[in-house]
Image (tube, rainbow, N blue to C red):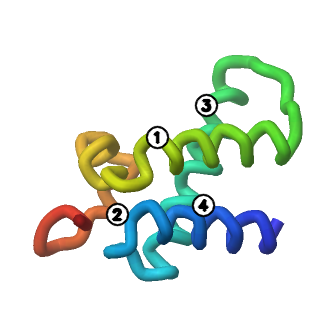
């Protein structure tokens, strides 16, 4: 699991170089947790880490360069927004 998070965080940093590794890692873990908990709440069967990794990868590829804009209104992700404004 550690290797997956590390790989995804580095991938996110490539899409959004203004993120530090720690910030990218937090985003990855948050997206991962959100995807799995949303599926569980919807009553979906757990399909494993590969499915979750695929979804997080898709989010990174589609929105990685502007994640701070995409999720800024979601209270769950407010902790990822820097106090002095969004991450650019």
Whichever of callouts 1 and 3 sits on the residue coming sooner in the sequence is 3
Whole-percent x, y for residue 46 in the image: 85, 32
Side of 35 where 64 appears, left or right? left
Q: In which quarter of the image is residue 19?
A: bottom left
* Residue at 69% in and 73% down: 6
In three-dimensional space, the C-alpha distance between marks 1 and 3, rounded to whole angstroms, equals: 19 Å
The CA span between labels 1 and 4 is 17 Å
At 72% across and 29% down in the image, what residue appears? 40
Local secondary structure at mark 4? helix
Q: Distance from label 1 to label 2 (Cα)?
A: 21 Å
Which residue is pictured at 84% across the width and 44% down the height?
50
Q: Between label 1 and label 4, give the one nearer the viewer.
A: 1
Q: In this view, which residue lies farthest toward the left?
A: 84
In the rendered image, which residue does mark 4 sit on?
29
Quarter of the figure that contains the N terminus: bottom right
Q: Does 77 appear above or below 48?
A: below
**Left or right: where 86 falls relative to 53:** left
In the picture, the quarter occupied by the C terminus is: bottom left
Q: Distance between the residues labelled 4 and 2?
A: 12 Å
Q: Which residue sits at x=36%, y=55%?
A: 65
Mark positioned earlier in the residue sequence (4 or 3) = 4
Which residue is under mark 2?
79
Marks 4/3: CA distance? Answer: 14 Å
Q: Which residue in the structure is indicated by mark 1?
A: 62
Badge 3 marks a residue whose secondary structure is helix
Q: Which disc is residue 38 wearing?
A: 3
């Amino acid at each position: 699991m550690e290797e997956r998070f590390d790989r995804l965080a580095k991938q996110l940093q490539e899409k959004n170089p203004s993120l530090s590794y720690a910030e990218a890692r937090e985003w990855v873990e948050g997206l991962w947790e959100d995807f799995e908990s949303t599926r569980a709440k919807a009553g979906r069967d757990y399909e494993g880490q590969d499915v979750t990794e695929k979804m997080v990868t898709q989010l990174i590829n589609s929105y990685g360069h502007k994640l701070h804009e995409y999720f800024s209104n979601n209270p769950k992700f407010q902790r990822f927004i820097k106090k002095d404004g969004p991450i650019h």
